[in-house]
Structure formats: structure tokens, C-alpha cells
Image (spheres, rainbow, N blue to C red):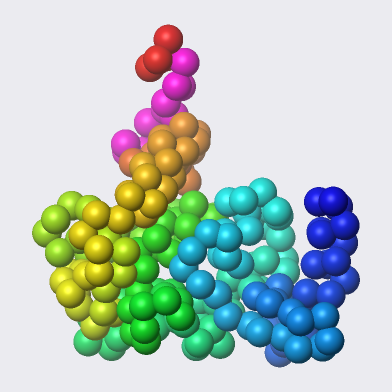
Amino acid sequence: MSQTIRTAIMDQAIINSTDGPLYAYEIDGLGGVNFMDDANIPSLMSLPYIGFINSTDGIYNNTRKAILSSQNPYWFHSASSGHSGIGGPHRGLNRVWPMNWIVQLSTSTSVDERTSLLDLLKTTTAGKGLIHENFDVSQTNGTGFGRLWFAWGNSLFGEVLLNMAMEEGELGAEILFGKGAAAINIADIVG
């Protein structure tokens, strides 16, 4: 069944754009296409996270670039805060979900992007130290958030940090622990 779904996506859900081929968010089977992304999982951003494709896939990278831009109706940007992110149809316009930044962090292949996203996640907790469900993109520190304790976002953040800590090199352990730091071996911790 998974191969049938994968084949259908590859045959029917890749759309052409001026930036190259993109994965569609939704298709209706009759030629109708919806291009957008939502901050949840599954989402287009999360395709490598859920194991559908590799984060180096060309179509995925075209799609990732497009969903992190005004081509995505749920990508919001505020000049006053300098924040940009993906929200969704669930909580209204201009509401970004930090969970999107976590998924973006997990699928990033750039040290600069990962470092920037970690800083963003640390500084948009409204001083609470927790990942919130969403907040108004114009808020510099995440005030005006919805749902103080968003277990899904906090758990996902912990998982992504642990995966980074177990990843050798500049994209993983070195971002978290400093240049030259070795990755953590879970067997050494629980062993």
C-alpha cells in the first residue's frame, strides 16, 4: 500500500512552478491543486522527518523554499519583529507555530539555519521556557501565545535536540556542545 501511495504522489502530486517542480499539499484527483503548508506533522516541511524522502531531495528543496515564502498562504512575516514562520488555518492569520521551526530545524542541512532556529526557539517563549502552540508573528518574544503548555511541540523539540546531540559533526553535536564535541551515544547514557 505504501508503494501505491508513493507512486500516486510522484505521478499526481508534483506540480510545476517557476522555481521548478514542487510537492502539492493537496490534490483532488480531478486536476485541482492546493499549494500551501501547515505547521503540523505531517506536512510538506516534515517529509524527511516522516521518512518519505531525504532532506537533500531536489523537489523537496524546491518545495521547502516555496513554503518558507509568500507562495505559502500560511507563511507569515513581520517586519517589526523580524520573525517569519508557518502557521495554519487552525488559529487564524499571522499566528506562527514554533513547532514549524522545530520541524524546519530537524530537516535543515545548514549550520547557520539550525543555529538561527535554535536562537529563535529560545527567545520566543515569552520568558516561560516552553514551546507554545502559536503566537502573533509581530511579537518579538512570543507574548500573546496560545496554549502555554503545548506537549506536542515540547516533546518534538526534545526529540530533535536529542537527535542533534547524537549526530556527529557541525550539523549536530557541535552546534549544541561546541566545535569538536563528540556526539552522544545513548548506550553510554542508559547503559
* 129 left or right of 100 in image: left
Q: What residue is drawn where x is 55% and y is 75%?
A: 37
User: Which quadrant of the rendered structure holds the C terminus?
Assistant: top left
**Does residue 59 appear in the picture of this structure?**
yes
* Quadrant of the image occupied by residue 34: bottom right
Percent position (x, y) of residue 121? 29, 59
Percent position (x, y) of residue 60? 67, 66
* 17 left or right of 92 in image: right
Instruction: Give the vertical position of 8 relative to 168 (above or below).
Output: below
Q: What residue is drawn where x is 27% and y is 73%?
A: 135
* Quadrant of the image occupied by residue 150: bottom left
* Quadrant of the image occupied by residue 175: top left
* 58 left or right of 100 in image: right
Percent position (x, y) of residue 10? 83, 67
Q: Nearer the viewer, residue 120 or 109?
A: 120
Instruction: Give the vertical position of 47 relative to 61 (above or below).
Output: above
Q: Nearer the viewer, residue 138 or 173?
A: 138
Residue lying furthest left: 127
Q: Is residue 164 one of those drawn in magenta? A: no
Q: What residue is drawn where x is 53% and y is 59%?
A: 41
Instruction: Give the vertical position of 156 relative to 99 (above or below).
Output: above
Give the dominant element type of the magenta stretch: helix, strand or loop.
loop
Magenta residue span:
177-187
**Does residue 110 appear in the picture of this structure?**
no
* 55 left or right of 188 in image: right
Percent position (x, y) of residue 56? 67, 57
Q: What residue is drawn where x is 36% and y is 54%?
A: 153
Q: Nearer the viewer, residue 133 or 116?
A: 133
